[in-house]
Amino acid sequence: MKERAGHGRAEHAADRQRPPEVSHGSWGHAVVIGAGFTGLLTARVLAGRFDRVTVLERDELPSGPAHRSGLPQARHPHGLLARGALIVEDLFPGVRAELAAQGAPVFDFGAGFATRLPYGWAPRRSVGIEVQSFDLTDLEAVLRARVRALPGVRVRDGFVVEGLHLSADRRRTVGVTGHHRADPGHKPVRIEADLVVDAAGRRSRLPGWLAAAGLPAPRRLEVPSPLVYSSRMYELTDGQAPDWLVAFEMTLPPSVDRGGAAITVDGTRRLISLVAPAEELPPPRDDEALQRFAATLRSPHFAEVMARGRPVSPVYRCVVGGNHWLRYDRLRGCPDRLLVVGDAFCAFNPVYGQGLTVAALQARLLARLLATADGPSGLAHRFQRRAARIALVPWLTATAADGGWSSEPTGRPARMIRGFLDVVLRRLPDEPELYARFARVQNMVASPAVLLRPLLARPGRRGRRAARTRLSGPSRDR
Ligand SMILES: Cc1cc2nc3c(=O)[nH]c(=O)nc-3n(C[C@H](O)[C@H](O)[C@H](O)COP(=O)(O)OP(=O)(O)OC[C@H]3O[C@@H](n4cnc5c(N)ncnc54)[C@H](O)[C@@H]3O)c2cc1C
């Protein structure tokens, strides 16, 4: 098969097409449910078209970076893939520099990551892809401040959305209902809107609201994963910085069922997450057992930081459950002027680090559709169909890999993707050029097709010997 030359570059250029500028507003009022990452990006894009944009958030929002109950995942390491970072920077120029000024390092993905793959270490050399590591609360605080400063945009926190308001024939969304948390009587409040966007995350209640209105709910695809996450922030005060900025140990079910991620948040802090099926991961309060668990990983970096560092947070445990996709893109009878974005639409097993970037791609898609549409009518259907295309490759890769957790036979496409991934993974430790391509695919700046040419070429003698020794399965360092 022929490789599409320059695929990654073409997509980069497309990402740089800015959304319509703020002065073009004329479509009335848009409401966004949820002020998470997706809601904030969506508000930025809508501000180019609507006179007013209101973001409704159930939490009381902090003025700076801080944890809140609606964002439990912020206790855990987050990586924004290069493609997502490009889009964020285009929507909010200067965000990377702002985070860097707070200590969030910018570095080359190949040189800065110490990645333990299932069959050996990833080559530690530059791959020409810049990434940044940060605490999710820092990113959100910066984005929130930017969105709050946009003309015509209002972020109303402490407001819980409880339902949709529909036209008499139920074919169009005309607003939402909800209540202020500060109101002890929870008096219902109705907010009229010309467009409603659900960015309420994994806990979106939209299917129930549709059902309550007598409308069909979307089909829910679900591919479970037993992985849970135990995360803790450490401070390294001995003045010796590790030689990595991110340490990552990849899981590959069923043979490699435990792993971890450690990210540099600033000059001294490292946020570490240990990942395994629930029954294998020790309880959060058992420090010694967590240390012992970290010592069983093939990468020594997690145990090292835990031994050398000073814990500056409790251990937070998170059970995600895996991947789900609510097929709004296939839902007949879904009211118009209602969009579903981010985790509310399609959520991935976090070990693959795709959620933020897929949400950013959806924001970019929305910006493009807004630029050519002449009103909010009909937008929802077009958006949802094309957002499904964005979700498809990340969904197939995540769910094919997670199919390895299931004892049931998986479908042929999933088996083929898993087989392909396994072939690639076996060769990566010894083939830096292949790893550079893999890094581009992983960061969504190139299509998986760029892996085909080097894979079809015969590996060098060293690569063949290494691959033979790995036929027995994933290796352990000790
Ligand atoms: C442990 C873990 C690690 C992860 N690591 C990564 C990673 O490395 N890279 C990556 O790309 N992704 C990662 N993810 C996924 C990523 O966190 C999500 O994809 C992303 O945060 C989704 O953003 P969102 O805005 O769609 O949803 P959310 O962040 O969940 O935001 C939804 C918002 O809506 C609000 N809300 C909900 N209901 C209502 C209501 N009725 N009324 C008003 N407001 C409401 C909530 O309070 C919240 O603020 C990880 C997830 C987890 C759990």
Image: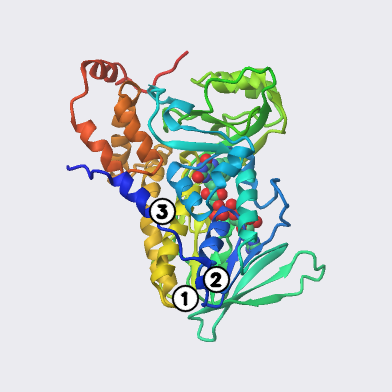
The residue positioned farthest toward the top in the image shown: 478
Q: Residue at x 81, y 71 (%)?
A: 185
- Sequence-wise, the earlier of marks 1 and 3 is 3
What is the C-alpha distance between the residues marked 1 and 2?
A: 10 Å
Looking at the picture, which amino acid does disc 2 mark? Answer: Val
Vertical placement of residue 453 versus 379, above or below:
above
Q: Residue at x 33, y 37 (%)?
A: 418
1 or 3: mark nearer the eye: 3
Say the numbered circle drawn on residue 16. Answer: 3
Dot 3 beta carbon under 8 Å from ligand 1: no
Looking at the picture, which amino acid does disc 1 mark? Answer: Pro
Looking at the picture, which amino acid does disc 3 mark? Answer: Arg
What is the C-alpha distance between the residues marked 1 and 3?
A: 24 Å
Residue count near mark 2 (Cα–Cα under 10 Å), binned few <14, some 14–19, many ≥20: many
Residue bearing the label numbered 2: 196
Residue bearing the label numbered 1: 376
- Residue 267 in the image: state x and y as whole percent: 63, 28
Vertical placement of residue 476 versus 182, above or below:
above
SS for tag 3? loop
